[in-house]
């Protein structure tokens, strides 16, 4: 019971911090300038980890590798709780990699859902263009293949289905790999 509560607390904190680190990486990868409130929150929450990592891992190719590696370090630290359950080092590393890939896929799904909500509720919300810009690299290739149905853009739905398939494949690969 106590280990379950501890796991819940650690996973919640790690998921929040890891998600913000992944958002920081993605914003810089797609060259999206965030609104000041989002930027302030993101950088204040993650600078303590990203700045020291940048001394070791500089940005290469215009990507902020320190943010991405920081997110993996967070998921790895959160997954270390599985040592208590008796898992080996290899098993913990594989579990951390699986969780890291799942965080990335869930992050993309969350951005797509947020965009869908904005389009239904308030397409002119201050954060709507920011979320749209974050989703554009995912949706652009799908929009080339999936035509508009009347004035309805089904690319969000197709992207969500593809991300769910990817999520299943990640789970299946790691189950078969054991």
Image (tube, rainbow, N blue to C red):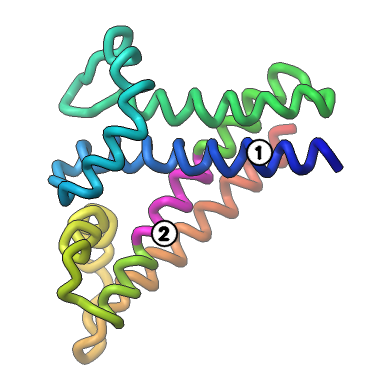
Q: In this figure, which residue is indicated by the disc labeled 1?
A: 174
Q: Report the residue at 48% width, 28% height from top.
A: 72
Q: Which of 65 and 35 is in front in this view?
A: 35
- Secondary structure at numbered mark 2: helix
Image quarter where the C terminus lies is top right
The magenta region covers 101-111
Q: Distance between the residues labelled 2 and 1?
A: 23 Å
Q: In screen coordinates, is 38 left or right of 102?
A: left
Q: How many marks?
A: 2
Q: Is residue 59 left or right of residue 105?
A: left
Q: Where is residue 157 in the image (x, y as percent from the top left)?
A: 38, 73
Choose between 42 and 70: the one closer to the eye: 42
Residue at position x 41%, y 25% in the image:
70
Question: In which quadrant of the rendered view does residue 113 lie?
Answer: bottom left
Residues at marks 2 and 1 touching, judged by CB atoms closer than 8 Å: no
Between discs 2 and 1, the one toward the N terminus: 2
Report x, y in % for residue 151: 19, 88
Numbered badge on residue 110 = 2
Q: Quadrant of residue 153?
A: bottom left
Task: Tell me residue 99's x, y (percent).
Answer: 57, 39
């Amino acid at each position: 019971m106590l280990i379950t509560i501890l796991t819940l607390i650690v996973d919640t904190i790690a998921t929040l911090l890891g998600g913000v680190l992944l958002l920081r990486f993605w914003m810089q990868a797609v060259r999206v300038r965030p609104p000041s409130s989002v930027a302030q929150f993101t950088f204040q929450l993650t600078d303590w980890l990203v700045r020291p990592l940048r001394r070791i891992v500089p940005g290469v190719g215009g990507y902020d590798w320190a943010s991405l590696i920081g997110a993996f370090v967070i998921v790895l630290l959160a997954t270390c709780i599985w040592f208590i359950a008796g898992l080996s080092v290899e098993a913990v590393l594989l579990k951390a990699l699986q969780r890291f890939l799942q965080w990335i896929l869930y992050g993309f799904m969350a951005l797509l859902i947020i965009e869908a909500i904005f389009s239904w509720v308030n397409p002119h919300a201050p954060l709507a263009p920011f979320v749209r810009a974050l989703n554009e690299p995912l949706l652009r290739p799908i929009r080339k293949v999936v035509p508009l149905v009347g004035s309805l853009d089904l690319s969000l739905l197709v992207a969500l289905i593809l991300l769910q398939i990817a999520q299943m494949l990640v789970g299946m690969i790691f189950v078969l790999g054991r």
